[in-house]
Structures are given as C-alpha cells and as structure tokens.
Amino acid sequence: MRKNFARFAMFAMALMLALSACGQPAATQAPATSAPANEPFVFGMLYVGPYNDNGWSQAQYEGGLYVEKQLGAKMLYLDKVNPADRPGTTPDQLAEELVAKGAKLIIFSSDDMKDGANAFAKAHPDINVIMTSGDQVWADGKNYTATPNMTNIMGRMEYGKMIAGCASALSSKTGQIGYLGPLINDETRRLAASAYLGAKYCWEKAGKNAADLKFKVDWVGFWFHIPGTTTDPVQISDNFYTTGYDVVISGIDNPVNLGEAQKQTAEGTPSFGLAYDYVAACEAAPDVCLGTPYFNWGPEYTKAIASAQDGSWKSQFIWLGPDWSNINNLDTSLVGFENGPALSADAATAVKSFIAELAGGLNLWTGPLNLQDGSAYLKDGEVATDQQVWYLPQLLEGMEGLSASK
C-alpha cells in the first residue's frame, strides 16, 4: 500500500513539473495587452510633419527618444501625418498600423489630429491615448467627454511666447514686429496674443511709448507650408522684412523666417527672427536668431507612459508651465526658452529679469484687456481664468491681423 502510494506521489510530482515546463494554463496567463517582462513596452507616435523638421515634430520625436532612454521602452512612429502628405488616410487609421506592430499606447501629437484621436480612443478602450494640445478630457473645458483611456498634455507656451515677445521688443530698432501664424484657432490666437503682451510689457518697461509699437500677425493656413494649399511662409517673412518689420516671430512648425532674416541682413538691412518648438531651432541661422521658446515633451510623456506600464494610468488634463527654478532643465521643465546668438548682452540681461518677474508671479493676462474689436475682455485688475486664456476668441486690441478665418 505504501509502495503504491509512493509511486502515485512520484507520478504526480513528475506531472506537475511537466506542466510547469510547458507554461501556465491559459486561464492564468497575463492579459494580452501586457508586454512580457523581458520585452520593452511599445508606444506609437504620430507626427504632423517630418520627424526632423527642426521644429514641432522634431521636438516630439526627441521626446519619444527621452522616453526610450528613461523607461527602456520602444518607440514606433509615423511622420507627415497630414492630408497633403497622406491623402485618403486619417490619423486613427494610421494609429491602427502602429497597434498592429505592437504599440500599447498611441500619442497623437498635433491639434490637427483631434478628431482621429477621439475616434481611435473610442474604438480602442484597451489602448491608452495621449492627445497633445487637446482639451477633450478637461472637465472645465468646452469640449469635455469622459474618456478613461485618454490624457491631454500641453505646455503653457504662453510663457515662452511672452519671453519671445520681450526679446523681440528689446531687439527691434523699428518697433515693428511680425508674427508668422499657422492656422487660426484657440491655441494660435492665445499664443500670438501672449507674444504681443510680452512685447508690449518689455517695450514700455524700456521707456518707450506703446503707441509706437506695431505688432502684426499674418497667417499661413496650416502648421507649415503645403504648396498649392497654404500661403508661403517664406514669402510672408520676406514681406515683413521688406516693409519695415525687423523682427519676425515664428508661430509655425519650422523656422523658415530665419533664412529670410539672414538674407536681409546679408543685403545690408539688419533683421532678426525667433524660432519655435525645438530647443536647437536657432541652428538654422544662428547669426540672426534671438531665441527659441520650445517644448520639452520627454518628462511628461515618461510619466504618462510609466503609468500605462505599471497600471496606475488615469485620464488627466495636463497644462503645465515652466519649472521656474530652471526653465531649461530638460528633466523637469515642459516649456523653456533658449537665448539665440543674436540676442545682445543687454537684451539677454533684460530677458533674464523678465523671466524672474514671471517666476515671481507677474501675470500679463490681467486687465484691462480688450479684444481686437474693442470689446472689453478683462476689467481693470481682473486676472484671466484658464478658460479665458485657452479659448481666447479674438486677437487683442493693439494687434493687427485676422482673428478668424475668412
């Protein structure tokens, strides 16, 4: 009896070892959405322009590289996600391609992809989505929709644009500043207006009359030039520089204005420009570049993707300003400003003081402020709410240019 029992016990042990070697039964396996412990977490990114555009899309790409380094994750991406470069496709369709290649999270990195991000998030509740610059999950916003698998991330570039405007006003000899606008929407209006507020503040602080400052916005029609569809930003820049504007601030996805400033300077008319989006964008023409307000996506993307990895993900609206202890700390600050080689030492000192004022609580979105049509927007002493800044309905009084598309 004992002998038979011993044989049975040995047989049972052998069977258990065999099952262990073959893996766990299907009912106890990890969910299909979780990457095996020895494989990297895969995330996908969609860029509206070329990944190496020296602007918005390159800053997004660099943010993805930062995530790879910090988390040991793997990035997949598709660039030139726009109707001109990929006719007949939509961002949500292209996101499907990345999921088919193993992506467990998708970043839609442009406001232009908002509808696609919404459609994809709804169709794939098991895939986490980051929508850059959107307001879909802002509970206090105008477009709120409960979407548990979506997070919005945006930097308070209003500060960066104020600094750019300040640098422009301190460097202009003619008092005429041009702003190269992309398409017209809430985001682009508030950023152009922020640049104006920064320019006006520093112009007046330098002892100059506000009436002598001219600030004009000219719109391209998209985030960058699409031949046959948009106005050529090179031509707009040239028009600015040849009609008395000696500084042009870029609000589009690449720094084409710098080339025109360089051309004018070489022909004997000193001209300057400011780039946008990407920390190294001044490299396009350093001798005429006053600086670059830029986005640094890596740290916030890392936090969001880490939460998807460890299961702590939650839907959030994230709209963060600079790390005021050091706005150029690439491990902490979502928004920064890089001085350009063309910024004079005196102007650089004044810009530094202006940044210190902003860090200390200076808020230029304080009334009295009127809209472009003269109607009151903020009463004297009234501080704008986040909603009033985000959804700015017009350009501000004192600015030239269209406030809405024709």
Image (spheres, rainbow, N blue to C red):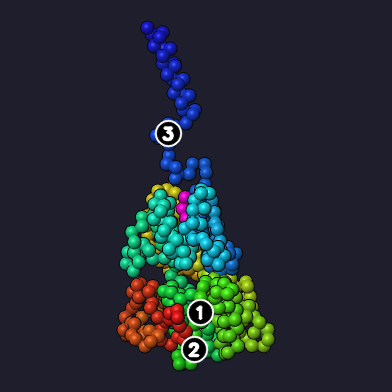
* Residue drawn at 36 percent across, 88 percent down: 374
Using the rendered image of the protein, determine whether residue 200 is visible from the camera's viewpoint: no
Badge number at residue 117: none
Query: Marks 2 and 3: which is nearer the front?
Result: 3
Seen in the picture, residue 100 relative to 137 is either above or below; the reply is above
Query: Marks 2 and 1: which is nearer the front?
Result: 1
Circle 3 residues within 10 Å: few <14, some 14–19, many ≥20: few
Main secondary structure type of the part rendered in magenta:
strand
Using the rendered image of the protein, determine whether residue 110 is visible from the camera's viewpoint: yes
Q: Are marks 2 and 3 in contact (CB under 8 Å)?
A: no
Residue indicated by mark 1: 219
Q: Is residue 36 magenta?
A: no
Residue indicated by mark 3: 26
Relative image position of residue 269 (x, y in whole percent): 64, 88
Of the two numbered discs 2 and 3 on the same chain, state the one appearing first in sequence: 3
Residue indicated by mark 2: 214
Q: CA distance from mark 2 to mark 3?
A: 70 Å
Circle 2 residues within 10 Å: few <14, some 14–19, many ≥20: some
Look at label 2 and name its amino acid: Lys
Seen in the picture, residue 25 relative to 140 is either above or below; the reply is above
Look at label 3 and name its amino acid: Ala
Q: Is residue 377 rendered to the left or right of residue 195?
A: left
* Residue drawn at 41 percent across, 12 percent down: 6
* Residue drawn at 40 percent across, 9 percent down: 4
SS type, badge 3: helix
* Residue drawn at 60 percent across, 79 percent down: 234
Q: Which residues are magenta?
A: 103-107
